[in-house]
């Protein structure tokens, strides 16, 4: 915060050309980039909600948002998918505890050096499974959608925003997926 305040002070008081000549464009860009607000990240979760999982898939965003008090007995969890302007799917529509709608599965293999966490639900004849995997240090996340036994994988552009997914889902003590 002190450095961010100093940068804002300098930009209000000194001509940008003088700052560029003094510090160099690269240094200024690096400083400004490192202090970009976290709120600019792509998520459907509000500031009052807890983001369990959030990533970009193509031009859309997948988010798992919850109440701040979510644990194995209280709170709510919602799956949200769509553009930031328009949601294509919100599940469940109400704010209910995840044990009513979601199931989870965690696979770990020390031989394969793999950890895979899945959180799934069904809506009508369509199954949705949000996943995060770490296989030999390679991280991947996304959702696969199953309709009539056929899976379509939608992969996140980056697993950033999904780092705490495994721990947060484990805390919920949900019934097993499949």
Image (tube, rainbow, N blue to C red):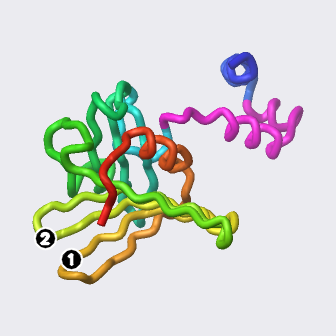
Distance between mark 1 and mark 2 Cα atoms: 7 Å
Q: Residue at x 40, y 45 (%)?
A: 43
Q: Position of residue 65 (x, y in %)?
A: 34, 40
What is the quadrant of residue 76 in the picture? top left
Tell me the residue that label 1 is attached to. 147
**Callout 1–callout 2 Cβ contact below 8 Å:** yes
In the picture, which quadrant includes the N terminus? top right
Q: Secondary structure at mark 1?
A: strand
- In front here: 120 or 139? 120
* Percent coordinates x, y for residue 91 in the rendering: 20, 50
Query: Looking at the image, is 22 positioned above or below residue 108?
Result: above
Q: Residue at x 60, y 66 (%)?
A: 109
Q: Which region of the structure is painted magenta?
A: 16-39
Question: Whole-percent x and y of residue 133?
Answer: 54, 63
Please report whichever mark, 1 or 2, sits nearer to the chain's N-terminal start.
Answer: 2
Is 140 drawn above or below residue 55 in the view shown?
A: below
Q: Which mark is residue 125?
A: 2
Q: Is residue 150 magenta?
A: no
Horizontally, residue 96 falls left or right of residue 31, namely left
Residue 96 appears in view: yes
């Amino acid at each position: 915060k002190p450095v961010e305040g100093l940068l804002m002070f300098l930009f209000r008081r000194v001509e940008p050309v003088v700052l560029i000549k003094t510090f160099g464009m690269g240094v200024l860009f690096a400083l400004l980039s490192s202090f970009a607000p976290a709120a600019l990240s792509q998520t459907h979760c509000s500031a009052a909600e807890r983001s369990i999982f959030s990533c970009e898939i193509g031009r859309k965003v997948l988010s798992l948002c919850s109440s701040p008090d979510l644990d194995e007995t209280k709170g709510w969890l919602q799956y949200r998918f769509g553009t930031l302007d328009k949601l294509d799917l919100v599940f469940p529509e109400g704010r209910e505890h995840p044990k009513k709608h979601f199931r989870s599965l965690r696979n770990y293999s020390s031989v394969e050096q793999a950890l895979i966490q899945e959180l799934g639900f069904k809506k009508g004849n369509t199954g949705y499974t949000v996943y995060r995997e770490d296989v030999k240090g390679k991280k991947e996340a996304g959702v696969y959608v199953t309709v009539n036994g056929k899976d379509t994988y939608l992969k996140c552009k980056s697993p950033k925003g999904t780092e705490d997914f495994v721990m947060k889902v484990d805390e919920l003590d949900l019934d097993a997926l499949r």
